[in-house]
Image (cartoon, rainbow, N blue to C red):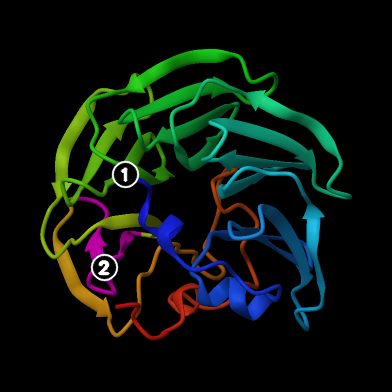
Amino acid sequence: MNPPANRSRPLRRSLLAALFACLPFAASGQSILVADTGYFTIGRYSLADGTGTTNFIIGLSTPYRIAISGTDLFVANYGSGTVGRYNLADGSVINASFITGLSGPAGIAISGTDLFVANYSSGTIGRYNLADGSVINASFISGLSGPAGIAISGTDLFVANEFTNTIGRYSLVDGSAISASFITTGLSSPFDIAISGTDLFVANYIIGTVGRYNLADGSVINASFITGLSSPAGLVIEGSPIPEPSTYAALAGLVALGLACWKRRRVA
């Protein structure tokens, strides 16, 4: 089964369309980078007026999530089962097959010198060396069910399991489960998560909502914090403090939470 966002219609070549399709994106300096799954590219646009190019990086294979660390951009290619590494300044290839042998990589996150990949098909989180892509532990976390979005806070790693409608919490140190069912209330095909301060936000693809939860204990703050969305698949948060590189590093100045998944008509 393909991730939900893969069932969306192809995107038009514009920043607005990319945002409407709720695809993951990240910002760097004065630019916004968009993973355009429909055209197999990464686009780069001005944060000021949206002008730019769809073809900043081309030749990708169903790019899903992107992550920034320093001067490098990492791309999770769901179709080819790879993570590619590119120069953030000009989009040139550093290593298009930086990490290989993945199984439907749908989520990616960076913490310190490690890169974590959510393998949607095999139900695992892999851990890799950020410097050279070498394997630290390909099954750092296993037994998951459709892991898509992942997020890191301190020494914890949170996973959105689409098939079981759960958010799991795991140790970033050894991958052990702190609570495999950390959040269960109000979820419906959770496909991405984002963290801001003491709150954790969840994008529910099926019911078109974003829920808000307590990061400390998983209790519900508002399971329908944002409603009326159509298949939200990506989340970012404007101006969140970022103590270390993460999946959506350098996001200051982005659109507000929820605008990443603009309301659009449901596809019957």
The CA span between labels 2 and 1 is: 27 Å
x and y, in percent, of residue 243 in the image: 55, 47
Is 73 situated left or right of 201 in this image?
A: right
Q: Residue at x 22, y 72 (%)?
A: 207
The magenta stretch is 198-216
Q: Would you call the spot at circle 1 few (<14 residues within 10 Å), some (14-19), or many (20 or more)? A: few
Q: Is residue 105 left or right of residue 139?
A: right
Q: Main secondary structure of the magenta part?
A: strand
- What mark, if any, has residue 1 been given in the picture? 1
Q: Earlier in the sequence, mark 2 or mark 1?
A: 1
Q: Position of residue 24 (x, y in %)?
A: 54, 59
Whether residue 71 can be seen here = yes
The residue where tag 2 is placed is 212
Which quadrant of the view contains residue 255? bottom right
Q: Amino acid at mark 2?
A: Arg
**At 52% from the left edge and 20% from the top edge, which residue is drawn?**
101
* Quadrant showing the N terminus: top left
Q: Secondary structure at mark 1?
A: loop
